[in-house]
Image (cartoon, rainbow, N blue to C red):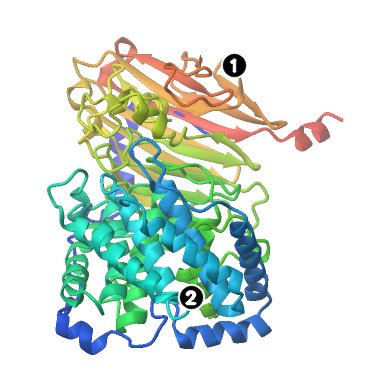
Amino acid sequence: MIKITNMKKLNQYLFILIFSFSLNSLSVIAQKLENPITTGYLKANLSKKSPKLILTPTIEKEIKLKLKSDILVQNYFGYLKKQADSILEKPLMKHELEGFRMLAVSREMVERMGVLCIVYRLEKKPEILKRIDRELLAVCNFADWNTQHFLDVAEMSFAVALAIDWTGEFLPKSTIQLAKKSLVEKGIKPSYNEGGERMYWINSSNNWNSVCHGGMVAASLVVADIEPELAAKTIARALDKLPNSLKEYGPDGIYPEGPTYWGFGTSYAVVAANTLTTALGSDFGISKSPGFMESADFFMHVSAPSGYFFNFADSWDKKDGDDSVLRAWFAAKTGDGLYFDKDFFEKPVEAGRFAGPGLVWISEYSQQKVSELPISWHGNGVNPVAVFRGDNADPSHYFLAVKGGKASISHGNMDAGTFVFELNDVRWVLDPGNQLYYPLNRIGFKLADYSQYGERWTLLTKNNQGHSTITVNDARFLVNGQATITGFKDSGTPEVTIDMTPLYGNNLKSLSRRFVKESNQSVLIEDSFEINDSTKTITWGLMTQAEVQPTKNGAVLKQDGKELKLTILEPEGISVSIISLDPPPMEIDKTMENLKRIEIQIPAWIVKDKKEVLKLGYQKIDYFRYFLLNC
């Protein structure tokens, strides 16, 4: 049940919550990594054996043993062999751009090299080695690896480095020479063009930082024999700069760019940690960075029973094989079965570009424990999140996830205060999620303009009116306004409170949102606000694809043959309206079938004593009980 309440009890609510909660610091200071890297250090410590990136001779022996005894490893290797066969039927990679990006080409090259090289090492089929050689010659003869979008360079560098390391002893020397030269000239050296286009990644704190430095680390480890000084300089730079992005995981593991970008950014932080460990014997503190290992818990928390994400920021809504493969590294590292996606490895489909390294990670996994997710959880940081689930006896797969945060962060949206809600395997309240970048880039849309009046915020997926939150005076949120979790209780009747006040500037004196999980069938939402002389209207919004039938004091939502009741508990005398968003407001907006926004409009003039509490409740309609009562 979702409920909306009256503001006169504001002081009482705040008192109750404050004594039970202590807010952690929103900012985490970057912790330096160990950094002993010099040319001499590399000469003394770099493994002389190959392979040494993620895979080692010892690990390879263990994989061969697991292939005789572990059904999941056998099954997954069978999948990789089929993928290798399909790659043999495809044309070679071409230097093709989508707008200013070559990222799709680089990512496919990572997948091809991982799959082909691991299958070749274990089966030694000549046709696979021949294809690896041809693939390497093709990409190394590209004019460049697209330095204008350095993610493309980083991923291509990792792909080529992995191929040389895993199969170099079997390839023609001329191919190895060309590939290493390409890593130096097309990969590492361009990374020092600090004044070039989009080179902010060197010092940035977003996913570009970990992806680009991770790719450069792998490349440097492979070319250290021919360019020892450049390799040492590049690895040392990575260890100096990676803390900029690693600090974003603190304090509780929440990845501020959302679960989709957790997969992207974290995968290359793992590449850096894993390749350094296997090549040099240490990851120099990467995996011990505050919140880094806990980020796997974050990913599990924001994954609903339906298989969909709480897709805040620029996230897509559905998990894929990449996530399962990456989780296998966390499972291997911790021995925790919570992270190991057994269902996926029983029937792998689209394992993604880390499919090859994935065989290493699942073969290294040995279950030591299986942790359980708490049914109530929250984490802090620049994008704080709280999640509530049903208990173990809950047959309706209850899932409520809410967030605070701010818009002016990488891939941020004006989505503070938003939530998603699932019950009986139906997502009743949704987030519109991300939309494709290329169509927007093609028309010159300024998607990366995060200023207060930036073009980004005209999109439905990016502005506050496209999320299930509260808008005042039809105005955008302040991009630097930070909504924080100010109260959380996980025992008894779980609840969370978010202070939304900083989002509204002079439009409102104060506003807080309180979400209460009253039962496995209901949720209460209580919005307490205090207006000022600038306040004209308060608009409560909810995004859904359900059919909506307004009632006297709320609405009934119908979807997939099921129903949910929305009840306005307080104040009396207000009703809902439905705004159709299919088609969306602008032609360039994301189109979602049957998308609509349920609104509750509260004009300022009806608010008594400048304070009000809006209470809303959602509760499922139980057909079975209804039928029994009416027999």
Q: Residues within 10 Å of mark 1 (few under 14, many from 20)?
A: some
* x and y percentages locating residue 360 in the rendered image: 51, 75
Residue 126, which numbered label? Answer: none
Q: Quadrant of the N terminus?
A: top right
Q: Nearer the viewer, residue 257 or 28?
A: 257
Q: CA distance from mark 1 to mark 2?
A: 53 Å
Q: Is residue 149 above or below residue 30?
A: above
Q: Secondary structure at mark 2?
A: helix
Query: Which residue of the protein is positioned furthest toward the right in this rendering?
Result: 631
Q: Residues within 10 Å of mark 2 (few under 14, many from 20)?
A: many
562 horizontally vs 380: left or right: right
- Does the image show residue 39? yes
Q: Is residue 588 above or below residue 115?
A: above
Q: Nearer the viewer, mark 1 or mark 2?
A: 2
38 horizontally vs 598: left or right: left
41 horizontally vs 414: left or right: left
Q: Nearer the viewer, residue 122 or 457?
A: 122
Q: Nearer the viewer, residue 26 or 2?
A: 26
Query: Which residue of the protein is positioned furthest toward the top in this rendering?
Result: 605
Q: Residue at (34%, 32%) from the top-left corner?
A: 9
**What's under tag 2, amino acid-wise?**
Ala
Q: Is residue 62 above or below residue 335?
A: below
* x and y percentages locating residue 252 in the rendered image: 33, 60
**What's under tag 1, amino acid-wise?**
Thr
Q: Residue at (62%, 61%) from the top-left corner?
A: 83
Residue bearing mark 1: 551
Residue bearing mark 2: 332
* x and y percentages locating residue 346 in the rendered image: 67, 65
Quarter-of-image position of residue 36: bottom left
Q: Secondary structure at mark 1?
A: strand
Query: Which residue of the protein is positioned furthest toward the front in this rendering?
Result: 174
